[in-house]
Image (cartoon, rainbow, N blue to C red):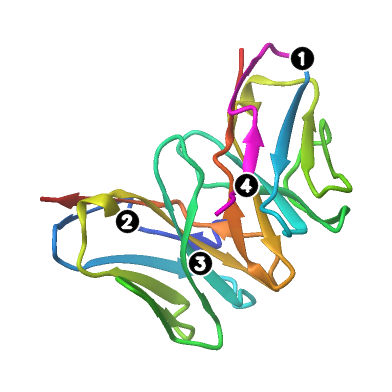
Amino acid sequence: DQQVKQNSPSLSVQEGRISILNCDYTNSMFDYFLWYKKYPAEGPTFLISISSIKDKNEDGRFTVFLNKSAKHLSLHIVPSQPGDSAVYFCAASRGAQKLVFGQGTRLTINP
Amino acid sequence: AAGVIQSPRHLIKEKRETATLKCYPIPRHDTVYWYQQGPGQDPQFLISFYEKMQSDKGSIPDRFSAQQFSDYHSELNMSSLELGDSALYFCASSSLGNLETQYFGPGTRLLVL
C-alpha cells in the first residue's frame, strides 16, 4: 500500500523554466512533508519542508505547496538550472516519526 | 557543516554471513533512523532510536538488530544474510529542536553474493 505517490517517474524541463514535481498521499494523519534531492551513489539531501498547518513554504528557488483537502503537494523550482537534474523524493511523516517516501521523480534540466 | 557519517560505504558479503553497518549522526543530534533502499525502490524505514532507546520499528527482519550507543552513534547488525538483503542502507539523524527534519548520510551499499 503506497501511502505516498509520485506518479511521474520522470520530468524533462528546459533550463530557466519552471519545474513542477507532484506528490499525492493517502494518509490524512501525515502532518509534515519534505522534499529530498538525490544523486546516484549519494544519500537524499534535504531541500524543503512544510507543516500541515501551512499551505506554502518558500526557500530561494524552491517553493512547496500543500493542498490538504486534495492530499496533494507540489515542489516548484524556478528558474530551473542544470544542477537541479536529480531524482526528487517526496516524503511524509506523522508526529516527527519515520518518513514514508514516494517512488521518486527523475528531473532532467535541458540546456 | 558536519553531516551524517556512515561506514563502510561499500560492503560485499556471502550468503549466511553477518554484516555491521555504522552510523555517526550530526553532532548534537540525538535521534537516528535506518532505511533500506532496494534497487529501483523508495527508501523503506527499518528502525529508529531516540536517546539510546528504540523509538519505532518498521519492516526490519528478525535477523537484523540495531542499537544506539552513549555517544549517539548507531550500529545495524545483520545476520544470516540473504541475496535479497542487497540494498543501499541509509542512516538519518534529527535533533530534538527539529525532530521533523531528517538528514541523511551517504549510505552503505551492501552486496550479498
Query: Left or right: where does residue A25 sit relative to residue A104?
Result: right
Q: Position of residue B111 (x, y in %)?
A: 59, 20
Label 1 is placed on what type of residue? Arg
Please report the residue visible at 59 percent of the width from the left and 72 percent of the height from the top. Answer: A27
Is residue B6 found inside the magenta-colored segment of the image?
A: yes
Q: Earlier in the sequence, mark 1 or mark 4?
A: 4
Residue stretch in magenta? B1-17
Label 2 is placed on what type of residue? Ser
Residues marked 1 and 3 touching at CB (< 8 Å) = no
Label 3 is placed on what type of residue? Leu
Residues marked 2 and 4 touching at CB (< 8 Å) = no
Q: Which residue is mark 1?
A: B16
The chain ID associated with circle 1 is: B
On the same chain: label 2 and label 4? no
Measured in 3D between alpha carbons, the distance from the residue under mark 1 to the one under mark 2, in whole angstroms, is 38 Å
Q: Nearer the viewer, residue B46 or B33?
A: B33
In this rendering, the label closer to the viewer, 2 or 3:
3
Neighbour tally class for label 4: few under 14, some 14-19, many 20 plus, Cα within 10 Å: many
In this rendering, the label closer to the viewer, 4 or 3:
4
Q: Which residue is mark 2?
A: A8
Label 4 is placed on what type of residue? Val
On the same chain: label 1 and label 2? no
Neighbour tally class for label 2: few under 14, some 14-19, many 20 plus, Cα within 10 Å: some
Measured in 3D between alpha carbons, the distance from the residue under mark 2 to the one under mark 3, in whole angstroms, is 17 Å
